Amino acid sequence: MRPGKHIWRRIGAQGQLLAPVYCALIIFLANAATAQDRPDFATCIAIAMGRFERALERNPGPEAPNIALLSQRDVLICGGAGIQTCDLQDDRIGCQNQLSAEQVALRAEVLASLPRPGALEAPETGWSQSLYPQMWEIAHGRSAGPDCAGQGALMEAWCRAVEINRDLAMAIMTWQMARLLQAVPSAPEAGWIAPAPPPMPVPRP
């Protein structure tokens, strides 16, 4: 069991992510039928961070952050799309392992960019004094055991990629909380992701 499950009661429906994430992933994959049509994992995360920054412009401020902006959804979708893309490759296991390594490296960069709770430069509110420290601890936590052990090689690689993606999603959501508190720069400024490509124009009816 992962630590701190009570945190989800603090941030509402974010604790019930899997069904909408997989529904969104099915739609995403239906609109991008081949691996060539999908952005790679790094580009997908950059797009997600760009979307978050645009939403952040409407945030009321660190004294009363809009907690509804916190989400693991996009990161989980990017990880799921990467896993599905690997399933279309000749070296499926090697691709899954490479995806896992990419996410481990990105998570390390995200965590390194997060200020420790005692060093958080933000207004002293319940969000900065209670919620952020809890999220910081969970983001730095580890699984209680080898969740993927005992599977075949391909299923173990797939399972490991899923678990690592969830760890990365928690780390990025904690960074989002720090960003809402105006305690960290944007992801491209922090250096752990490239700037998002410009949004695609919306076709006219």
Image (cartoon, helix red, strand yellow):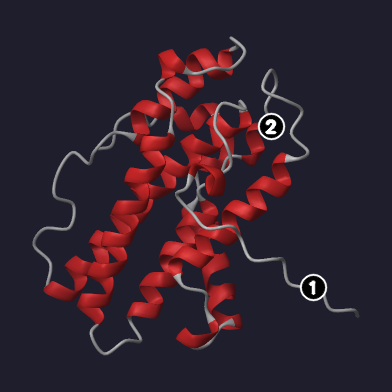
Residue 161: image x %, image y %? Answer: 29, 62
The answer to whether residue 16 is above or below residue 79 is: above
The answer to whether residue 109 is above or below residue 25 is: above
* Label total for image: 2
Q: Nearer the viewer, mark 1 or mark 2?
A: 1
Q: In the figure, residue 56 lies in which quadrant?
A: top right
Tell whether 55 sits left or right of 159.
Answer: right
Q: CA distance from mark 1 to mark 2?
A: 27 Å
The answer to whether residue 99 is above or below residue 31 is: above
Q: Mark 1 packing: few (<14 Cα in 10 Å), some, or many (20+)? A: few
In the rendered image, the residue lying farthest to the right is: 205
Tell whether 145 sits left or right of 29.
Answer: left
Q: Mark 2 packing: few (<14 Cα in 10 Å), some, or many (20+)? A: some
Front residue of 62 and 187: 187
- Asked whether the beta carbons under mark 1 and mark 2 sit within 8 Å of each other, the answer is no
Residue 150: image x %, image y %? Answer: 8, 62
Residue drawn at x 53%, y 46% is 187
Q: In which quadrant is the C terminus drawn?
A: bottom right
Q: Residue under label 2, please give it.
A: 66
Q: Residue under label 1, please give it.
A: 201
Secondary element at tag 1: loop
Residue drawn at x 69%, y 32% is 66
Q: In the figure, residue 96 lies in which quadrant?
A: bottom left
In the rendered image, the residue lying farthest to the left is: 150
Secondary element at tag 2: loop
Residue 40: image x %, image y %? Answer: 46, 72
Q: Amino acid at mark 2?
A: Asn
Q: Amino acid at mark 1?
A: Pro
State whether residue 188 appears in this view.
yes
